[in-house]
Structure formats: C-alpha cells, structure tokens
Image (spheres, rainbow, N blue to C red):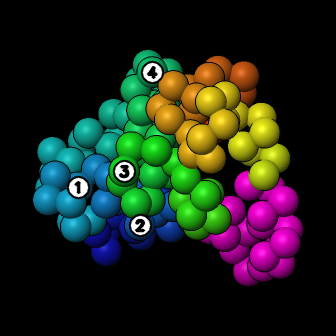
C-alpha cells in the first residue's frame, strides 16, 4: 500500500486510503498485483461508467453497509475539505442539501440506485474518476 500511495495520482487524493481498502482483496488496504490491476482497470478511460459508479459508491460507503448515510457523508465532506475545516453547522447544511437532492425515498441515506441517479446528472463524472499513467 505504501508504494501505491506514492503514485502522484493517489498521493494527493483525499480518498487514497479508502481506494486501497476497496480494491484490496484482503480488505486491509494491502494490494496484490491483481488488486492493483483491477484498480487501474476501473480508473482507466476505457472502464464503463456503470463500473466506475459502483466503485465510487463503495469508496464513499465508509461503514460498508451498502448505503451512504449521514456519517459517510460527513467523512466524505471532511476529506474533501482537507485543511479548510468546515463548522459542524456548515457540514450539516451540505448533508441536508445532498439528502434533499438525492434521497428520493427520504430515509436519510442513499441507496446505490439513488447514488447512481445523482451521478447520471454529473456529465464530468467519468472524466474525473480516472487515473492517467
């Protein structure tokens, strides 16, 4: 994992630890060569959007319960903000807006179908979800 994280594309990615964990066949973040190939395949330009969406969902589902809940969103926002810390009120405001936009069944969590629906509205998702070597 240490060697993988030295890649410039992952070194600056705030989700680098989650990416390694999701692609790790052992689940601990350690990547075999096959795991690395799988990761590079998903992040390639040639990977289908459906595969990219599936892995994006898994990366953002921090507690791995097959839903993106409020705590998952809080971790996501915190990682995206980096050193620019938001107040708890600001984070909650962002979470509330995400749920208003994306939580179609109003159960305060995003299912894969709801996540996929939101991603379908983001035309630049496929371009952003890639690693160029």
Residue under label 3, please give it.
Answer: 65
Q: Position of residue 119 (x, y in %)?
A: 63, 28
Whether 17 is among the magenta residues is no
Q: Please state if 7 lies on the left or on the right of 116 as rendered.
A: left
Q: In this view, does 14 lie above or below 106?
A: below
Question: Secondary structure under badge 2?
Answer: helix
User: Within 10 Å of the Cα at label 2, are there few (<14), some (14-19), or many (20+) other Cα atoms?
Assistant: some
Q: Do the residues labelled 1 and 2 touch (CB within 8 Å)?
A: no
Residue under label 2, please give it.
Answer: 17
Q: Do the residues labelled 1 and 4 touch (CB within 8 Å)?
A: no
Q: How far apart are marks 3 and 2 (CA)?
A: 18 Å
Q: Earlier in the sequence, mark 2 or mark 4?
A: 2
User: Within 10 Å of the Cα at label 4, are there few (<14), some (14-19), or many (20+) other Cα atoms?
Assistant: few
Which residue does the image show at 62% across and 23% down from the upper left? 117
Of residues 14 and 99, the one nearer the viewer is: 99
Residue under label 4, please give it.
Answer: 50
Q: Which of marks 4 and 3 is nearer the N terminus?
A: 4
Residue under label 1, please give it.
Answer: 24
Q: How many labels does the image show?
A: 4
Question: Secondary structure under badge 4?
Answer: helix
Whether 78 is among the magenta residues is yes
Q: Which of marks 3 and 1 is nearer the N terminus?
A: 1
Which residue does the image show at 66% across and 28% down from the upper left? 104
User: Within 10 Å of the Cα at label 3, are there few (<14), some (14-19), or many (20+) other Cα atoms?
Assistant: few
Q: How far apart are marks 1 and 4 (CA)?
A: 20 Å
Q: Which of marks 1 and 4 is nearer the N terminus?
A: 1
Q: Give the range drawn in magenta.
A: 76-95
Q: Quadrant of residue 12?
A: bottom right
Q: Distance between the residues labelled 3 and 1?
A: 17 Å
Q: Please state if 127 lies on the left or on the right of 45 as rendered.
A: right
Of residues 23 and 62, the one nearer the viewer is: 62
Q: How far apart are marks 2 and 4 (CA)?
A: 22 Å
């Amino acid at each position: 994992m240490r060697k993988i994280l030295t890649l410039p594309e992952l070194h600056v990615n705030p989700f680098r630890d989650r990416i390694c964990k999701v692609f790790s066949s052992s689940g601990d973040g350690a990547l075999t060569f096959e795991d690395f190939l799988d990761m590079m395949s998903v992040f390639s330009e040639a990977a289908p959007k459906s595969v990219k969406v599936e892995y994006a969902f898994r990366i953002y589902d921090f507690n791995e319960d097959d839903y993106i809940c409020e705590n998952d969103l809080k971790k996501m926002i915190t990682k995206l903000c980096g050193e620019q810390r938001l107040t708890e009120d600001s984070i909650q405001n962002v979470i509330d807006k995400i749920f208003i936009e994306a939580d179609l069944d109003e159960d305060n969590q995003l299912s894969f179908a709801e996540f996929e629906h939101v991603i379908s509205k983001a035309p630049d998702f496929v371009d952003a979800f890639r690693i160029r070597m």
